Every structure is written in C-alpha cells, then in structure tokens.
Amino acid sequence: NINEFKSMCIYIHTYILGKLNSDNVPIEKIKLPTIKSWKDIEIIFQDEWNIKIILRNKEYISDYKELGFADNRSDHKVAKSIKSWSLLQLIASQEGRIDLGAYNEAHKSKIKKQKQEISELLRKAFNFDEDPFRLIDGKFIIRIKLTPDPHFREDYYDVTIKGNRDILPPAQW
C-alpha cells in the first residue's frame, strides 16, 4: 500500500532527524516542565503518527503512543491509534476548532466522547488539571497551538465516499 509506505518513510525520516538533533528528546525519556497554561504548549504534527512538542522554547519528539493515544488491546500486533487521535488531527487542520453544529446528534455524541478522551489524555501527558478545550457558541476550541501535518489534506477523506474505499485510488491520483 502506497500510503503505508509513505507513512513509514516519513516516520524513518522524522526518527533520524530526531536522533541527529540533540535538542530533540523523546518525551518518555524526560520530565516535562510544569506548565502554567495550555497556551504554553505547541504541538506540530510531523506526519500521521509523529509530533513535535514545543514547550518553553525546547523541542520534544513524540508520537501518538507516547501521549497515550494507542489502542493497546492484545488483539493488535501493532498498536493502532484510537479514534480520538484522528479527531485531534482534524481539530489541528481546522485551526483548533470543531463546530458541533455541522454534525447530526449521533456524530455530536461521538465527538463529545472523543473530545473528553483527548482532554483526559492531554491532562495526563502534561500533568495539568485544567481542560484544554473551551466550548464557545457550539464549537470546541482547543487552547493548545496545533499545527497540522502539511500533507493532512492530501490524505484525509473529508467527503463521504460511497462504495468500497479499499478499491478506490487516493484523490491525488
């Protein structure tokens, strides 16, 4: 699969760059400084799985697993990301917002549940009790600066596709 190959190449590239740059320290190996506000944090999506966290002018390399967004059930050989990781990426692509008014009640319920999961995982990862989201005029707005993966729009299915997605080529083909 070309998308899996592309993701693997990006991961290897990001991993090597992270190893070569001594300022980039994997998040699980360090104790993050205490934050006073969610605005102290910037999360930059490097690709679908890897992120760079900037906190007090220092960079930390991490990924969905290290932040707690991995589905670690025993029936998976490789930990997959949970659905809330995809929602976090979508929020990043929409300038830190998600408008609940754009969804029906069933989808709103799912989004609210995933938003709650994102809040809990980020609170745990950054050891900060305050909710990283605000609800303003029916929109969840995250207080963390999020920068989406530059290729996010290329790879994301943001329209409903009828039929078998496995046999449809990517939009850029």
Image (cartoon, rainbow, N blue to C red):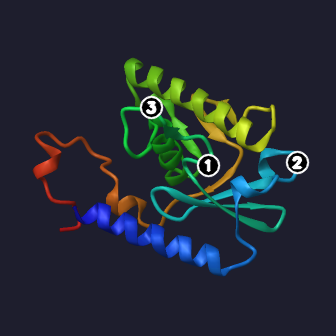
Instruction: Give the tally of numbered discs.
Output: 3
- On the image, numbered disc 1 is attached to which residue? 66
Residue 36: x and y in percent read 89, 45
Residue 34: give its label: 2
Q: Residues within 10 Å of mark 2 (few under 14, many from 20)?
A: few
Which mark is nearer the camera, 1 or 3?
3
Q: Quadrant of residue 123?
A: top right
Residues marked 3 and 2 touching at CB (< 8 Å): no
| Residue displayed at 78% across by 50% down | 39
For badge 1, the amino acid type reads Glu
Residue 29: x and y in percent read 74, 57
Dot 1: element: loop
For badge 2, the amino acid type reads Thr
Q: Residues within 10 Å of mark 1 (few under 14, many from 20)?
A: some
Q: Left or right? Give the position of 36 relative to 25.
A: right
Picture layout, residue 113 above or below residue 50: above
Residue 73: give its label: 3
